[in-house]
Amino acid sequence: MNRLEEISTKLQRVRQVLAETETAAVRLRGTDWFAWATAGGSNTVLLAAETGVAEVLVTATDAWILTDEIEAQRLQDEQLPQAENSPYHWFVQPWADDSQRSNFIRDVTNGGKILSDRPSHPLESPLPTSLIEPRRVLLSSEIDRYRQVGRLATEAMTEVLTQAQPTWTEYQLAGAGAEALWASGLEPILTLAAGDRRLPLYRHPLPSREPLGRQAMLVFCARKYGLVVSLTRFVFFQLMSEQDKKLHDTIADIESTVLNQSRLETPLNLIYQALAAAYEQHGYPHAIREHHQGGTAGYAAREMIATPETHDRLAAQMILAWNPSIPGAKIEDTFVLRSDDSLENLSLDPNFPSVEIDGRLRAVPLER
């Protein structure tokens, strides 16, 4: 399936929702939904923003990219498929006159009700689950792009951790990670780094000026085509102690429980319960309360986080990113759940050390 075919498939789904809900249009502002609706295009300029510099408007008969004169040419040249038969029209207004866009939307919808991912007007309502749920089940073309993002992200991680030095600060490690991701064409939407002292203390260790010392943890959330790959790796600048090995063996064993439970039609709350039991069994009864454990991913680092109340069920072509952790050890990769109930690791680098656990290769700390 090429990009135009993928876009057409998604627009067809949007129009089904319009018919089911008797709504005039769907308006998509978020960076996540823009990427979904354009088969990998980006409306991002400010990296930390949830919305971008363009949006998508879909009615029963037409579809538009709405943007301003600053962005239109770049988006047309670089972010949308260039073809005479593109399903998208363009509405471009002066950057200083937002009223033109508002008037255009009112005219093409006849002032009717609109569904939006970020409602901001009395006539706008949130997207229904009938549109949200299909986004969480990726098409084969989206999985192909995800494999590329995963390969680039994990290769960048390996490059950085093989070059890192114990005298580096956490800032330097995170900066090297961001540089490697940008050099690969990926957006570093999250880079966490912690050295020997801080990594056992905090689940989300934003980098500091402290030197790394004898070990370090580096965490990536890397984005391209709107798709987010999450992974965590450790490096030791000396041989691991027996206590270090025990910690990492324990977290890998705990993770194997959640991976074994990640099967078709399994509710996320049951996986959460199995993970809670695994923590208890290994002597960490409070660990599940100290950090969210992950869940499904895709056009967000986490589409759904597993909790005791999350009854949504897993389906084929969903993306999973679990991140169990205990003080001093964490494990995380990004997987796709296949139709045969197997898990494909999208962020596995064969050049990084790994061991086989329950038939899967799982990364272990790099000892240098």
Image: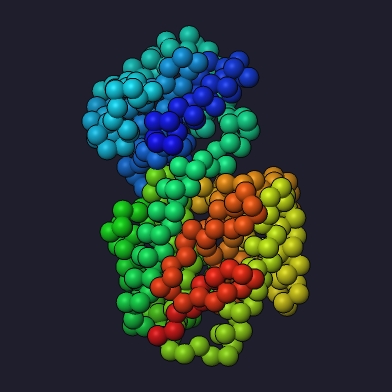
Q: From the viewer's side, name the closer residue of 271 and 108.
A: 271
On the image, the x and y values in percent for residue 17 come to: 59, 23
Quadrant where the N terminus sits is: top left
Asked whether, in this view, residue 151 is left or right of residue 68, the answer is: right
On the image, the x and y values in percent for residue 38 come to: 40, 34
Q: From the viewer's side, name the closer residue of 244 and 255.
A: 255
The picture quadrant where one finds residue 98 is: top left
Asked if residue 66 shows in the view, the reply is no
Residue 46 vertical position relative to residue 123 in the rendered view, above or below: below
Asked if residue 213 shows in the view, the reply is yes
Q: Residue at x 42, y 21 (%)?
A: 63
Total marks drawn? 0
Asked whether, in this view, residue 358 is left or right of residue 112, the answer is: right
Identify the image's colour scheme: rainbow, by chain, secondary structure or one colour.
rainbow
Residue 201 vertical position relative to residue 137 in the rendered view, above or below: below
The picture quadrant where one finds residue 45 is: top left
Q: From the viewer's side, name the closer residue of 49 and 248.
A: 248
Quadrant where the C terminus sits is: bottom left
Asked whether, in this view, residue 169 is left or right of residue 283, the answer is: left
Q: Residue at x 49, y 29 (%)?
A: 9
On the image, the x and y values in percent for residue 357 come to: 61, 73
The picture quadrant where one finds residue 8 is: top left
Residue 263 vertical position relative to residue 351 in the rendered view, above or below: above
Q: Residue at x 59, y 88 (%)?
A: 243
Q: Residue at x 64, y 71 (%)?
A: 358
On the image, the x and y values in percent for residue 226 come to: 42, 44
Residue 211 vertical position relative to residue 207 in the rendered view, above or below: below
Q: From the viewer's side, name the closer residue of 148 and 365.
A: 148
